[in-house]
Amino acid sequence: MIRVKKLTLSLGALLIVGVSGCLQPTEDEAIGDTAMPATAEQPVDKIAQALLPLPEDLRGGAGVFEYDGEGNRIVLRENTNHVECQTLDENGFNWCYPMASSARRDYQAKLSVQDMSREEVQAAMLEAEENGEVEPWHPGSMIYRTYNNGDRIQLLWVVLLPNMSSADTAMSLESQRDPSLAGMGRPWMMRDGTPGAHLMIPINGLAESNPSASVEPLDTKALYETDAILHATLPLPEDLRAGAQVVSYDEDGNRQVLREGTNQIECATRNAMTGFTRCGHKRLGAQTDYRAQLSAQGMSFQEVSAAVVEARENGTVPSATYGSMIYRMYEEDDRLKLLWVVYLPNATSEQLGMSTVAQRDQSLAGMGRPWMMREGTPSAHLMIPINSTELSN
């Protein structure tokens, strides 16, 4: 039997460039492995194995490929949708990517087998971008990854946010590696403000995820009665709660500041009509005010939501910036209880390699994956259900 020596390009290697910086791997970063030749013989079911990182609706049409030792692409299955997956590497990782990034990954694969340093590969890719030979990563691109041991995050999705910062996106920078290994991780941003900035999304609660013990639900309703300010910050990751500004609205929709903030986040106390508690960047305060004013006029939740979407699209209220995060909590079982949302105005699933199939029912059962809504519109966004926490379904 002839064995083909394969080149494995991990995300750490792929993000050396494309963006203008170089990612240096760290022990707590699951995407930071360097490219190494894989010589281990692949299992017979390597196509099915390669598809595991993806949501189920994308698996049937995804392409599957690998690189040989000379950086040549070997197609094992042609794609019929907008994503493709690389076969299992010797380190136990499977990776899937948007098809929109395939040409640049092929270009880098050719460079990576040459006698070039990391810095030389970076410089060559930057030059290729400037010359128009390769396209940069599209901001918001999704990369999917599984790992077959429990010493790292086993099911991880990554959203690329080049040059974006936590100050602009309202994202946490506190590593969730340890909670993720325990099956209870929340998303967090890495490489804040650099060309390699990205959002790490550990997916909890699935067969492919790190196992988690049962979590005792927090009695949030009781907390609301005793400490409305703390309650208002619960949708946030813990490191952002203490510095968040907290506001409430009277029956006429007038804003009242209950606590001044020291970070970029603002939370509004629970809306009695909708049951939602929301947090986001302070720049969205005008939108929150508008929502409260419409609710005070007696409009239904659906009417308010439609009016806010229209106001964002016509510029009446400021929209969330590209890549910014909104946090939302709900306390009944008929909706997603802990939901984080990344705004991606006008983006499409094809550009970013995302699914548009709703995960509402799976999320209600505590097994939801992220999905895109309103693709191609100014209101396009990524829904991120947070599973397996004390606030989750």
Image (spheres, rainbow, N blue to C red):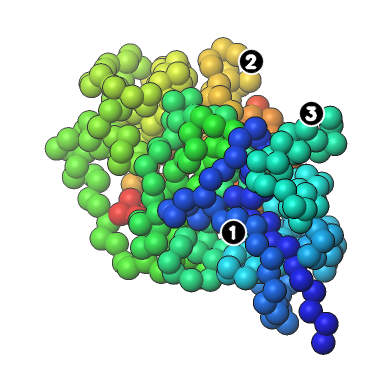
* Residue 146, horizontal then vertical, whole percent: 57, 63
Instruction: Write the residue at 65% across / 57% down.
Output: 35
Instruction: Write the residue at 64% across / 50% down.
Output: 13
As drawn, which residue projects farthest toward the left?
226
Query: Dividing the picture into quarters, in which one does residue 374 lie?
Result: top right
In this orientation, does residue 57 appear? no
Q: What amino acid does circle 2 point to?
A: Asn
* Residue 51, horizontal then vertical, whole percent: 68, 66
User: Label 2 crowding class (10 Å Cα cut-off): few <14, some 14-19, many 20+?
Assistant: few
Between label 2 and label 3, give the one nearer the viewer: 3
- Secondary structure found at label 2: helix
* Residue 66, horizontal then vertical, whole percent: 77, 64
Tell me, for residue 314, which label it has, or none.
2
Label 3 – label 1 distance at C-alpha: 29 Å
Q: 275 or 128: which is nearer to us?
A: 128
Q: What amino acid does circle 1 point to?
A: Arg
Query: Dividing the picture into quarters, in which one does residue 43 lie?
Result: bottom right
- Secondary structure found at label 3: helix
User: Between disc 2 and disc 3, whose residue precedes?
Assistant: 3
Label 2 – label 1 distance at C-alpha: 38 Å
User: Between disc 2 and disc 1, whose residue precedes?
Assistant: 1
Q: What amino acid does circle 3 point to?
A: Glu
- C-beta proximity under 8 Å, tags 3 and 1: no
Q: 233 or 184: which is nearer to us?
A: 184
Instruction: Write the residue at 80% across / 35% down.
Output: 128
Between label 2 and label 1, give the one nearer the viewer: 1
Which quarter of the figure is the N terminus placed in? Answer: bottom right
In this figure, which residue is indicated by the disc labeled 3? 130
Could you tell whether 264 is left or right of 341 in the image? left
In this figure, which residue is indicated by the disc labeled 1? 145
